Image (cartoon, coloured by chain):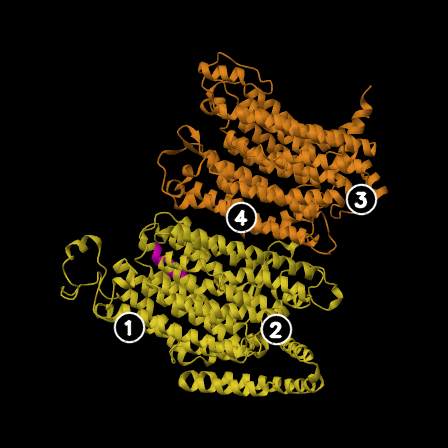
Amino acid sequence: MISPFLIVALLVAPLAGGLALVLIPRLSAVEIRAFTLVASLATLVFAGILAAQYDWAHSSQMQFEWWVPWVESFGLKFSFGLMDSISLWLVLLTAFLVPVVVLGSWSAVAERVREFHAWLLFLEAAMLGTFVATDLIFFYVCFEFTLVPLYFLIGIFGSEERLKAARVFFLYTFTASMLTFAGVLYVAYFNANLPATLGLPAAGRWTFSIPDLIQAGQRMSPSQQTWVFLALLAGFAVKVPLWPWHTWLPLAHTEAPTAGSVILAGVLLKLGTYGLLRLAIPMTPLAAAQWAPIVGGLALVGILWAALVCWVQRDVKKLVAYSSVSHLGFCVLGMFALNVIGGTGSVLYMINHGLSTGALFLCVGMIYERLHSRDMDQMSGLGRAMPVWASFFVFFALASVGLPGLNGFVSEFLCLLGTFRAVEAYGRGAVVGAHVMAAAAGLGMIGSAIYILYMVGRVVFGPLRLVVFPEESKLAMGMSLESAAVPTVPRGDLSAREILTLAPIALACLWLGLFPAPVLKSLEKPVARITAAAVTEAQKLSIDRLTVGVADVEHMVAAENGRISASEHAGRGIFRKTAGTLLNEAPEAAAEGQGGWRISSGGGRVDSRMNP
Amino acid sequence: MMSGVGEKLVHLWPEMALLVGAVLTAAAGLCTRRRCRALPACLAAVSLGVSGALVLIQIGGLPQLGGGLAGLNLVHYVRLLVVGLGLLLVLVTVNAAEAWSGSEQADRQVGSGRIGGLEQRSGSQVSDHRGEFFAFFLMSLMGVMLVAGAEDLVWLFLALELVSLPTYVMIAISRRPQESSAAWEAAVKYFFLGALSVAIFLYGFALIYGASGSTRLEEIRQLVRRTGPENVPLLLNVGLALAVVGLSFKIAAVPMHFYVADVYQGASAAVSAFLAVVPKTAGFVALVLVLGVLDVDGGARIPGVLGVVLWILAVLSMTVGNTLALLQRSVRRVLAYSSVAHSGYMLVGLLAGVNLSVEQGMLGNGLGGVLFYLMAYGLGVTAAFAVLGSLEHAGWEADDYRAISGLARRSGPLALSMLLAMLSLIGLPPMVGFVGKVYLFGSAVQAGYMALVVVAVLNSAISAVYYLRIAGACYFGAAQEAVEIAAVPSRRVAGMIAGIAAVLLGLLGGPLVEAAGVAAQRRPAAVQTVHMLVRAAEKLQP
């Protein structure tokens, strides 16, 4: 059996590469870059083989499982495997982005090249480890260890305020995830003290196996679930980041070097959403269902608030950074809709956001390398001077906005659709409820179109204007910019290497936009499996809420109770059916664009009609 | 009769090896020729090695270690821990008692500043204290070994004094002439506060004796078994509480923590590492033994008022230690206050006790956690002080953040050791400090101290601030050309060994976790032998 070793190879390749960079003396900068590129490409190849060997028919089952003992007396193992296709997709995303980043920062880093690339490879190993870990502590180990490489990547290679950014980033996320750690310990403790007679495979002994602890966690009492959920949420919400715990993000993203920003936006933030989906929702389903309106509400506030903040940004990089807060809001909103559509959309959103936002950061980095500025007020009309760059930039901006046909659209649409249909999770009220939230999130979409297009308009179109540096500004004092000879961008348009950096991402965006069906199909089963328990709890809760509400109105008790339970039964059946069919339609809807909206509102109306 | 004693003396072989080593080292120190300079340190290392080998023979050899830990108990574990950390500390302290210049002023200071009854060797141009230093070094380590074997309060008291008394001298003679005033100040502070703490825990011991009528821990345990651990006489509780307070000086925990910053700052870095590791180990082992009298049914959590007292001390130690560390400008003072915080974490494990209601595994064995964490903390703090001891600024050992600023550009290995040490002390996975914290906090959860665990993890987060500041200074700051990197290769090696061990033991520390847990559960057997020896010795007397 060679397959388990594929995962080991996947983790070892970047780790060994990083160690080699630390240990091998006397390497020139070019050799280091080439070596890193080879190591990360090797990782990508392993990930590719993994995908080829993957049994897609059983995408919700654990595959390639393997473990080595760690601290056996704690029940700790280094155990890895692909728990389902969600892990595989995120592994692919990570393995894909790192070589791109290496290529993208080929000329950006001139000092301490060795450290830069070693940290980058260690970071890749840690990120991959998080996605393939099946032991909770091993997951936590990798999750936390990502902080160290990024701390150094930001702190050494960032821009002016890098020290503050690195410190804030590390401490904020570390503090939050210490609470997660306490929650993790509690779940393991709960499992260890369950009577072995319950029929759970791991009850009554210390283990940190994620599938075992998920089973055990579902047996916790409501208050226990709430505490554990909040502990897990603490770490993951900061990582995502969920409003109002996002304050570390703009700083870290803006100050980080391009490679750091791309990895941060592309993969690191997904550790948070992945943790929520992998741990919080299945392990504490009742609490997840109870807290869904609040978490969803925070996500919604994040979407709208960050969109507004983006609108007034002058710093291109900061704008893209804030847009991450807004976009990840959609991701969380869809996830906590606690239905298959929202969940699938949310996972797809993780991948899409990683691609398009990562690419936007790369584009901004390329401009910064040339002009040493990210200020929108200081540049415009770059499309004239750098047509190739401008094409890519506009392309990724549109992908990020969610233009039908590109990747962003499908996932954003599914997240909104999932939210719209999430009457169990988000309630059905007229003021606060699934429909209102979906509508408000739709506003966020418009907002994102506004700020992204506004930025594109300022930077790419209009008269060509470049940064005026202080020493030149004296000379150019009396000169109007239009009358000046056409200024030239240093180093001109994109080089072949830079095109090679951006082109694969563009192709991936296009592919995910036009043919998302296979991805969605592979995600459907795992998401259904993960959210199953939470969905059940949400449905129970929603019945409870209604009955309680009705009981308050005494004269309607009898009549209402009868009607509700009947319609609820019917409603759930129809809901399941429509969810399935709509999911299958979604890809076509995506391609049709406007048609998708009609389907969504139609589906919503069906849904609202069947509810009292 | 004699042969019986001889047989029983077998159990003290490791200690005796150290004692013989101490005598030889002191004698070797008399040799003033330059060729002999490294001799005391070498002798100390050799006698530690011999001692370690003897412990391994006692357990039944290395193969036995892998297979089930059959012969291991608390005494063996502590001895091995002492030998391991001792060897590391020898590497760090190799140049600690560097040659004193024979200037008159220095000599006068030497004459007036003597503490602990050293003989003055006036007139010699180079008066070197290596011999005494390493002799005291070995005796202090021997004290820790004896603490672990104590079965009697008097024995425990004497062993604890054997740990402390040499350290007073070591602080005083560890620094070079130009820095010696700081060292003497530190030594005097440490001595007087140490004497105060001794008085307190001796008073506690006296009350325990008064309440139980015996100094033997086993007999006190019998008394507790009769009354039940919840209903022990008030006098016994007060005695135990006083003992805990007194011992908190050794472990540098609240309420006897206030000396720690001044002393760590005043002593040379190498001796500070020694102070952070050795008395703390002795103190915690003593606490395990003394509080063990309440542990009548195979180790439940500490009951009653004493539990509350320890709970408060743990919270205060963590919080006060971390908060004060946060405010310091001097890296040594940071490490000193963080030592208080780490004692707080270990008090959490001590409080949790042994709760192995769960069949498999070691989580729930808080005392095992303490024993393991002593090792984890020892590695981290030794590496940190080894790095600080390798840096000099204007003739003084490095002290503030400026001194380590930009270290990565000047010496990669030193900066890397510092980084690994800091990450391990933060408890960042997968370092050994993380495994230690899982051990301690997991056990505390098992014992039902959830609130305490939350306080502890939040404190870990606070500690990340200053540890990261240190690591960050090494990597991000501007290089300080004024700071010299001292030509002490042994310290650099010690730092690297400790740093790499902190990584490797985090990844491969499974057997050690097991060993610490087993050791914590096997106290009585260990104690028995030493006690029998005491009795045999008593009978020998005419």
Mark 4 vs mark 1: in front:
4
Judging from the image, what secondary structure is the residue with disc 1 in?
helix
Write down the chain letter for disc 2: A
Circle 4 residue: B462
Whether residues under marks 1 and 3 lie with C-beta atoms below 8 angstroms apart, the answer is: no
Q: Secondary structure at mark 2?
A: helix
For the residue marked with disc 2, what is the amino acid?
Answer: Ala
Chain under disc 1: A
Label 4: chain? B
> Could you tell me if the residues under marks 1 and 2 are in contact, i.e. CB atoms within 8 Å?
no
Check residue B229 in the rendering and tell me which mark sits there, or answer none.
Answer: 3
Q: Nearer the viewer, residue A287 or B268?
A: A287
Cα–Cα gap, marks 4 and 2: 35 Å
In the rendered structure, which segment of residues is drawn in magenta?
A32-40
Q: Say which residue appears at 30% left-offset and 61% top-offset.
A: A374
The span from disc 4 to disc 3 (Cα, nearest Å) is 36 Å
| Chain B shade in the render | orange
Q: What kind of residue is marked 1?
A: Ser
Query: Are the residues flagged by discs 3 and 2 in contact, CB closer than 8 Å?
Result: no
Q: Which residue is mark 2?
A: A534
The verdict on a common chain for dots 4 and 2 is: no
